[in-house]
Amino acid sequence: MTKLNKKLYIESIKGLHPADQADKLESLPTNDQSSILKTHTKYFHPDFIAYLREENRDLILEMIPNKQLVRLIQYLDLDDAVEILSDFETQELVNILSKLGTQQRERIEESLKYEENSAGRLMNRDYLAVKSDTTVGGLIDNLRKTRRGPKDFYNVFIVDNNNIPIGYVPSGRILRSKRSRKLKDLMFKNIHLIRYDNSIEDIAYSFRQYGLVSAPVVNDDNKMIGIMTVDDVVEIDHEESEDDMRKLGGLFVNDFYKGTITSAYSRFIWLGLNLLTAILASYVIDIYADQLQQMIAIAVLMPIVASMGGNAGTQAMTIYVRAIATKDINNSNYMSLIIKEFLIGSLNGLALSLIMGMITYYWFDSANLALAISFAILVNLGFACLVGIIIPITINKLKIDPALASGIILTTFTDVFGFLSFLSIATYILNL
Amino acid sequence: MTKLNKKLYIESIKGLHPADQADKLESLPTNDQSSILKTHTKYFHPDFIAYLREENRDLILEMIPNKQLVRLIQYLDLDDAVEILSDFETQELVNILSKLGTQQRERIEESLKYEENSAGRLMNRDYLAVKSDTTVGGLIDNLRKTRRGPKDFYNVFIVDNNNIPIGYVPSGRILRSKRSRKLKDLMFKNIHLIRYDNSIEDIAYSFRQYGLVSAPVVNDDNKMIGIMTVDDVVEIDHEESEDDMRKLGGLFVNDFYKGTITSAYSRFIWLGLNLLTAILASYVIDIYADQLQQMIAIAVLMPIVASMGGNAGTQAMTIYVRAIATKDINNSNYMSLIIKEFLIGSLNGLALSLIMGMITYYWFDSANLALAISFAILVNLGFACLVGIIIPITINKLKIDPALASGIILTTFTDVFGFLSFLSIATYILNL
């Protein structure tokens, strides 16, 4: 490894967007990160810590000298500061909080009272809400006079006398309107409220579904207590999808930026679980060892049956894990979807069993073996699609993340059932 | 099936957000959709067609009477209209265009000249761009006088004399500022330009990376020709992730809303390809049929070796398919990542081979068989992680979508190599 030239490095990040500064820092080896941050944190844009990837943040923040860290956090928007401080140990958190200004500290403490990943925790408290009889001129005059409220904002929210949001006006529309116009005549009434206890998945769904730019967060009485803005949601939504994809691929964490040992360890847990599954499947095969001995062609063909079941089941599971996440599946349609899946599995089972039956007949010159594999594939694909939809729905009802657990349960089912069905059908048809 | 009560149905969608109207329509059976749209399209919010899922849009638009369809399209924003018309056959497109107003027609035709999925096609042409010495008061007076330009907007863009974007001011900031202030003193200079030929992936990356709300689209001379806004990007980015996830799960299309036959057919293609893979793997096993006959325990254990390789390879592949999509991987880091993957595979291979060696020893009471499976798992996992990273990188360099093709190539490699390695090693060690 070549030694890092700090001066050149600092030169190369100057003027970059904080997001790019974070990227460049993350791509350095750990010891270089530490060496840079120890002495040169002040050359970074304070916002850069808000752009660090969640999986790297802890480690990198620990490298920043305490005084610098406090300075960076003082600079951050409330939602970013809260997100970062959420990860801290109690002692460290109290230590940092005590060094912040009273107003910022109180706001952060208020946010931390809400549950992690809920709107209350993620929201910003700096927003503009006015009564509906406010005029354009009145609003502008007021904004010019006071320094309170957000410096930059995209929507002005309209609340009634009880502070309940009843509409919003994009700030561009206010700019276009005459001073005498009342906001109630300009506002969009179709306003989407986010409850303080909504989860990030629900929030992302609403923003995407309704094309929102910002939305009010309300308490149990529908009173406005904060806002969520789209730039936070883009990130959250993206991470949600990435999370599901990762889990479906058999990963508990994204180890792209992690070291070799950490990566190997986190993947090992998954592989270890899969080993149990695979051993279970082999155990089933072992039951039929005598029959295999009599007709080795069965051993040659059996992986095909299990593999086709696994693939068909994975297709179904992928559809429904996502349909659950995007709320396309509900109590009223899931029975008809289960029937649909069984039909899809059976149709494809029929087509594949015909093809594989013919291939087997010509390969091993045995009509009975061909019949056995055809029948096994048919039964298997119907079964695989059925469990491919039932597993994620059931897991979700048990309040477990369907993306995380579905894959491994599915493989267990399709492997065990795949070998079991083919071996038992073959034993029966071939009189072994 | 019960007959749909149209009157009740129309009652139930009144006042709903167009996105929810689209959802409710999509969840109906095809013949009910057709029956409703034939006579009752006028009760839907015109925007509802912009919220239809891409995979359902074609079919649903065909159900709408031509006159109504023209009315709906007249109402749409440019970017939505262009997206919808992109799917039309030439003849139909010309027919619809001829019925639109001159200005809308010309704008749509202009957009359709750009490539599909490029910024030029996706952008909106209604935006606000002014010179940097414009004052807050001057801008407001001008906006109040003219009806040109967008009704609602979130950022005012600042361009130089050559119409090159040099900054932007959030409209809320303009509302807060005194009439005499010049926009050049208020503007953010850190502006991110999107080129007309940027792909949707690139655009989504920029919005996410820099937390953008809207960004100018420029031509080859960096002159401003349109804008992209975050609400469009949220949707696009979401669909990109969904697409990758779907493809990794073995699906060419999301068939959630498709009928049984269509779903079965689209999944069949994938399964058919997998059948070839599985047959290839069986062919390898068949080569060792004599050896299997001599020691049936090999047949019992061989699925474990292939399955562990497949799982480890999928973990690696999932990481790198996404790393390619999110631009985390590049020419400078991919060699070190390949080495990292090989090490991860070998480390986990070592751990799993020790475990599986012991299990095999106790299960089959054969030290040589235990040695064979241990060695096969070790070799296999290193190989699986290696191809798990090399396949997506190579496919991407060949300009093929890594999410689509990686899975099937990986399975072919891990299955064939899995069986081949275990069977050949076992043959050698056990002297079969």
Image (cartoon, coloured by chain):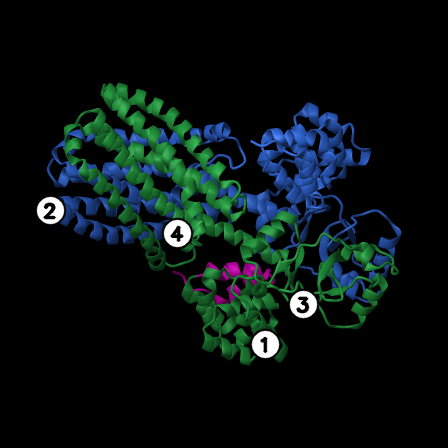
Chain colours: A blue, B green
**At label 2, which amino acid type do we have?**
Asp
**At label 1, which amino acid type do we have?**
Arg
Name the chief secondary structure element in magenta: helix
Is residue B45 visible to us here? no
Residue at left offset 76%, top offset 28%: A67
Q: Which mark is residue B251?
A: 4
Q: Residues within 10 Å of mark 2 (few under 14, many from 20)?
A: few
Is residue A43 visible to us here? yes
Q: Residues within 10 Å of mark 3 (few under 14, many from 20)?
A: some
Q: Secondary structure at mark 2?
A: loop
- Work out how far the residue at label 3 is from the one at label 4, CA to CA, in angstroms: 38 Å
Q: Indicate whether A136 appears above or below A31.
A: below
Nearer-N-terminus badge (1/3): 1
- Work out how far the residue at label 1 is from the one at label 3, CA to CA, in angstroms: 15 Å
Q: Residues within 10 Å of mark 1 (few under 14, many from 20)?
A: some
> Which residue position is annotated with label 2?
A365
In the image, the segment drawn in magenta is B1-28
**At label 4, which amino acid type do we have?**
Leu
- Work out how far the residue at label 2 is from the one at label 1, CA to CA, in angstroms: 66 Å
Q: Indicate whether A365 appears above or below A8.
A: below
- Work out how far the residue at label 2 is from the one at label 3, CA to CA, in angstroms: 70 Å
> Which residue position is annotated with label 3?
B126
Residue B216, percent across and down? 66, 60
Q: Nearer the viewer, residue B137 or A338?
A: B137
Q: Secondary structure at mark 1?
A: helix
Residue A202, percent across and down? 58, 46
Tag 2, which chain?
A
Q: Tell me: B61 left or right of B259.
A: right
Quadrant of the rendering where the C terminus of chain B is positioned: top left
